[in-house]
Image (tube, helix red, strand yellow):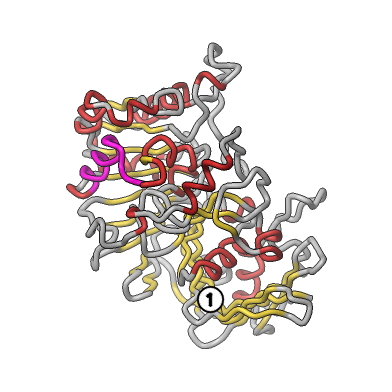
Amino acid sequence: MRVPTGARRTTLAGGTALLLTLALAPSAGADPTRHPGDRGSLVLVGGGLKSDNTQVYGEIIKRAGGTSARIGVITASSVPASQDPHAADPDQCSNSQCNGAYYAGLFERHGAADAQWIPVDLDHIAHADSDEVVRQVNSMTGFFFGGGDQYRYVTTLLHGSAHTDSKVLAAIRAKLAAGAVVSGSSAGAQIAAGADMVTGGDSYEGLRDGSSPGYFEDPSRLGHLPAGGFGFLRSGLIDTHTGAYGREGRALRLAADTGHDRVYALEENTALIVEAPRTPHERLRVLGPQGVAILDLRQARTGRSPSGAWSLTGARYTYLTDGDRYDPNRWRVLPDAGKRPLVPTSASPVPANPDVFHSAANPAGVPYSFLGTARALAATGTQRTATARTFEGGPRFTVTFSKQPGFTAWTTDGATARTVTGLRLAVTPE
């Protein structure tokens, strides 16, 4: 069985005009007063969730009741069986039903009492308003949304241009409000976003061309849905697979274009845990081997070069790792107790980075990422600024990282910057 791995963006077949109509429609779902807040929690993974990640699976199960946990698995972002040429082959299939069975089996192996596929997908859209499926949802103590394409969640669990909840989504929302855990990976994390949920795009093309409302056949074009996703988390935009696909650039451009002052940029195989979402008590924590970037655009300003190319100054970059906590209402970082401020002692210059957003167009591939430059700058005592460039030109963009007041790095070994807070960013065209 082949589980979706979270490609840069899966292209849906057909229906583009309909998708654009929905994307542009005004939406009650985008109204932050519609749902006053939840007692439950979210566990959002940036994709690439490994089957042996006992930390994350264990956290979801614990929050769902431990050994009595009953997990409802939703995989409507996968293609349905009718579109999978390998649907009859359990070793090759990659569709909503076999992916649902895969995740249900994983949750049971990790200790859940029961895990079941919730049978809603593009072959079974009517099930989203089935009272029988609602009863199944109501018997669950936690939920997991799998990866694929987040727009399939919009088309299966929300009602058309009205963007209102199906009965199944309303039941899941009510369970969250009552204290249940809602989790997801890749598209399953992305769909938790509120207004202006990203639908696709690459960093360079996003910086060069800007964002547009809609869903586009060209996977490099930066698109978003003004009406948003399910709105489980509204304190910032969400992006996924950030480091693997170099998505910091597209996240900055989308936030600036749509007027958002914060982005949660999630890394693979790592969870952002959100307590009491959409309340004054909302708190976040990072769990897993990588991290979560927080892009702060409160003081950011955009501009244009003489040639008309876009620029951004005044943004800030924070990268949190395992155990770090964050208060979104106060914009406050609380590093894990095992970390201490890093006193930079390295005299090595920050290495050149000619592909800051890990371009898909670069045949050589440059794994030295956006985060790598930030950490190298944090660790050196000889530089206050460092630059990194896009692989593409016409124009080529330069990202400038600056250690200014408000910047701190945190370490566990005295030499490596594990956590970085308040690093200043600028993006300028050459």
Q: Quadrant of the N terminus?
A: top right
In the image, residue 161 sits, relative to residue 71, either above or below, namely below
Write down the quadrant of residue 181 in the picture. top left
Residue 268 appears in the rendering: yes
Write down the quadrant of residue 388 in the picture. bottom right
Residue at far left of view: 178
Dominant SS type (magenta): helix
Q: Quadrant of the C terminus?
A: bottom right
Q: How crowded is mark 1: few (under 14 residues within 10 Å), some or many (20 or more)?
A: many
Q: Residue 65, position in %: x, y?
A: 21, 39
Residue 62 appears in the rendering: no
Q: Identify the residue at horizontal 57%, vertical 79% (top origin).
A: 424
Identify the element where label 1 is drawn.
strand
Q: Is residue 165 in the magenta section?
A: yes
Q: Residue 216, position in %: x, y?
A: 62, 47
The number of discs equals 1
Q: Identify the residue at horizontal 54%, vertical 70% (top origin).
A: 256
Where are the magenta residues, as a range? 163-176
Q: Identify the residue at horizontal 77%, vertical 82% (top origin).
A: 306
Between 141 and 298, the one lying in front of the other is 298
| In this picture, residue 21 sits left or right of residue 397 | left
Q: Is residue 353 in the magenta section?
A: no
Q: Identify the residue at horizontal 44%, vertical 52% (top origin).
A: 25
In the image, residue 207 sits, relative to residue 377, either above or below, namely above
Q: Residue 201, position in %: x, y?
A: 63, 53
> Which residue matches tag 1?
316
Residue at far top of view: 88
Between 2 and 343, the one lying in front of the other is 2
Between 113 and 18, the one lying in front of the other is 18
Q: Residue 34, position in %: x, y?
A: 26, 57
